[in-house]
Image (tube, rainbow, N blue to C red):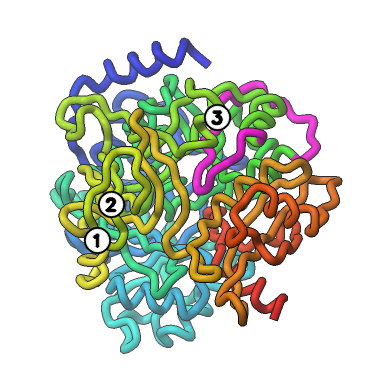
């Protein structure tokens, strides 16, 4: 760590006296001109410098152009956090195309839907990952895809393979072949570069309710967010960030890759999460910060190790609130001195709020931070990245500061809309503001508190119950690591509460005692009827680590039914 938080933040602001909108490839070129020989990507097998990334991205961009990709075309990327993801991502921008990083854990029907809905023109995919066989899925989705466009996917005219298991497919180019094609057509992508406010990415939401929606964001949007994150977290020069969160998601892509590049830093991407791999990676690559979600933090703390973690001083834990005790353990057991949490949506351009590393632990737990700092000329919002307020979820009327309601936000990084979904766009993006569906309040000091998700509320005996109130009570109880309250059908009350709890290691949970605690502390209609116990690794989660409460509700209904 170099310098105080204030000194580091001041130095970073001085480096960017004005914000100059640029494209992703332009951003890479500027960083490479300043830090050509610094590592940008560190893996256990290879190191990729900024200058090498520029050269590789140029070859791949020329290869894409030789395949027929033109400005505004769409290139899908179905790839885990491999080193190759980074030069490919910038190559797509350099070719003037729109990147569509897909969830690499999609099954056949999900993959078929997003490929068709996005009208993807070229797809770069792995040959296999996590037991999934991507070429075999393509065989079922669009037989004959190796030869070009098919009836099922008429827009997909070429597929490129990254061999992750030694396999190839006859007649199908590999990623190395694409670079070689670029060598045969040097300069083919010249002049194709997009403008800063052009569409740069289509990022599909997880689709927990209905079909996935492709969020359209510009080049400038993700770069502004990355800069604001580096400023808020007070990055030192050359920060190294380790994470396994996938780069098809804003967390790994913006808070990891783009934020690190602001200060000529490096990322240490991991293809999957295990606590043993995280601590080994920190030691080996001298990482200074890790990205995680609370469930991952708990697993790291419970992992016994003898690794040297002296380089690590920062943790960004997002996606869900963490109790104070978890922050205290991160500080005491990992030696971390700077902690942050954040909140946002893909529709907003990623995390829009963030606590400051100098904030007290209670603020990291009780809030999800304040709008990110972006104190440079040309950024609307009085030096903040965005503006949050609450509205009445029924009437849509604005509420006074501090009042609880649905959180809405506006700012320069918010989405253009959902790809080819005008009705869904109109429902979410109203009056120039993104309507989150999250319930919360904006405190007078600007910090945002979440109180629940409108779709996670349930009615018991006609009364609305906010799960977070129950969860907060139980996670403060000794021996409880995590708690998730959901509504389950009940013949008498319509719905009743059921809480899934994860015990701390070595603890034994008494469901009756927890229900008694709720009766003592909560109004009668809020008291859950059922307490069920499970292990942390049994929690259903998204690839980014968010607990899927709708699946917990389904599981509870099945168990109790």
How far apart marks 3 and 2 lie (CA) works out to 26 Å
> How busy is the neighbourhood of tag 1: few (under 14 within 10 Å), some, or many (20 plus)?
few
Q: Are marks 1 and 3 in contact (CB under 8 Å)?
A: no
Specify few, some or many for label 2: CA neighbours under 10 Å numbering under 14, 14-19, or 20 or more.
Answer: many
Count the marks: 3
Give the residue at mark 3: 362
Hey, which quadrant is residue 304 in on the image?
top right
C-alpha distance separating marks 2 and 1? 8 Å
The secondary structure that most of the magenta stretch takes on is loop
In this rendering, would 66 be left or right of 36?
left
Q: Is residue 113 above or below residue 508?
A: below
* Residue 100 relative to residue 196: left or right: right
Asked whether residue 283 appears in the rendered view, the answer is no
Foreground label between 1 and 3: 1
Asked which secondary structure carries label 2, the reply is: strand
Is residue 308 within the magenta segment? Answer: yes
Along the line of sight, the residue nearer the viewer: 174 or 278: 278
Magenta extent: 302-325
- Tell me the CA gap for discs 1 and 3: 33 Å
Sequence order check: which comes first, mark 1 or mark 3? 3
Residue beneath disc 1: 395
Residue 72 visible in the shown view: yes
Residue topped by disc 2: 391
> Residue 419: x, y in percent?
25, 67
Q: Looking at the rendering, which quadrant does residue 278 occupy?
A: top right
Number of the label disc, if any, that sits on residue 84: none
Mark 2 vs 1: CB contact within 8 A:
yes
């Amino acid at each position: 760590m170099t310098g105080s938080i204030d000194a580091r933040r001041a130095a970073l602001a001085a480096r960017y006296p004005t914000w100059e909108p640029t494209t992703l490839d332009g951003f890479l070129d500027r960083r490479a001109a300043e830090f050509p020989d610094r590592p940008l990507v560190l893996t256990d097998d290879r190191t990729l410098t900024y200058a090498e990334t520029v050269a590789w991205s140029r070859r791949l961009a020329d290869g894409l152009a030789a395949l027929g990709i033109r400005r505004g075309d769409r290139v899908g990327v179905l790839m885990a956090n491999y080193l190759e993801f980074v030069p490919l991502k910038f190559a797509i921008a350099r070719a003037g195309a729109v990147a569509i990083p897909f969830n690499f854990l999609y099954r056949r029907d999900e993959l078929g839907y997003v490929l068709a809905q996005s009208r993807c023109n070229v797809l770069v995919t792995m040959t296999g990952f996590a037991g999934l066989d991507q070429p075999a899925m393509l065989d079922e989705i669009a037989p004959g895809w190796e030869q070009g466009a098919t009836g099922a996917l008429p827009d997909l005219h070429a597929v490129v393979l990254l061999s992750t298991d030694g396999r190839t497919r006859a007649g199908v180019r590999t990623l190395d072949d694409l670079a070689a094609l670029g060598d045969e057509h040097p300069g083919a992508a010249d002049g194709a570069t997009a403008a800063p406010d052009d569409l740069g990415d289509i990022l599909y939401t997880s689709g927990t309710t209905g079909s996935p929606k492709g969020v359209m964001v510009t080049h400038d949007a993700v770069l502004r967010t990355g800069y604001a994150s580096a400023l808020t977290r007070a990055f030192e020069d050359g920060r190294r960030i380790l994470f396994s969160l996938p780069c098809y998601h804003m967390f790994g892509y913006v808070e990891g890759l783009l934020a690190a590049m602001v200060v000529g830093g490096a990322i240490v991407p991991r293809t999957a999460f295990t606590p043993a791999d995280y601590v080994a990676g920190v030691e080996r690559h001298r990482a200074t910060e890790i990205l995680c979600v609370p469930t991952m933090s708990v697993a790291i703390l419970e992992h016994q190790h003898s690794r040297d973690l002296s380089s690590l001083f920062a943790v960004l834990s997002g996606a869900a609130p963490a109790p104070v005790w978890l922050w205290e353990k991160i500080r005491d057991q990992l030696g971390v001195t700077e902690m942050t949490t954040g909140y946002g949506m893909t529709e907003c351009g990623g995390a829009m709020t963030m606590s400051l590393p100098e904030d007290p632990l209670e603020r990291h737990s009780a809030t999800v931070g304040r709008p990110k700092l972006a104190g440079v000329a040309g950024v609307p919002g009085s030096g903040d990245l965005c503006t949050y307020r609450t509205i009445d979820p029924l009437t849509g009327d604005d509420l006074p500061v501090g009042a609880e309601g649905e959180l809405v936000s506006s700012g320069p990084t918010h989405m253009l809309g959902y790809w080819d979904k005008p009705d869904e766009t109109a429902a979410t993006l109203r009056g120039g503001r993104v309507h989150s569906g999250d319930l919360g309040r904006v405190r007078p000091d600007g910090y945002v508190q979440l109180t629940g998700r409108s779709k996670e509320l349930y009615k018991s005996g006609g009364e609305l119950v906010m799960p977070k109130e129950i969860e907060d009570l139980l996670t403060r109880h000794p021996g409880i690591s995590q708690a998730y309250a959901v509504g389950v059908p009940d013949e008498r009350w319509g719905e009743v509460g059921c809480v899934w709890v994860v015990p701390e290691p070595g603890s034994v949970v008494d469901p009756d005692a927890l229900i008694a605690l709720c009766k003592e502390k909560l109004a009668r209609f809020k008291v859950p009827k059922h307490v069920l116990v499970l292990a942390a690794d049994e929690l259903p989660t998204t690839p980014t680590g968010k607990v899927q409460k709708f699946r917990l509700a389904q599981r509870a209904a099945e168990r109790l039914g």
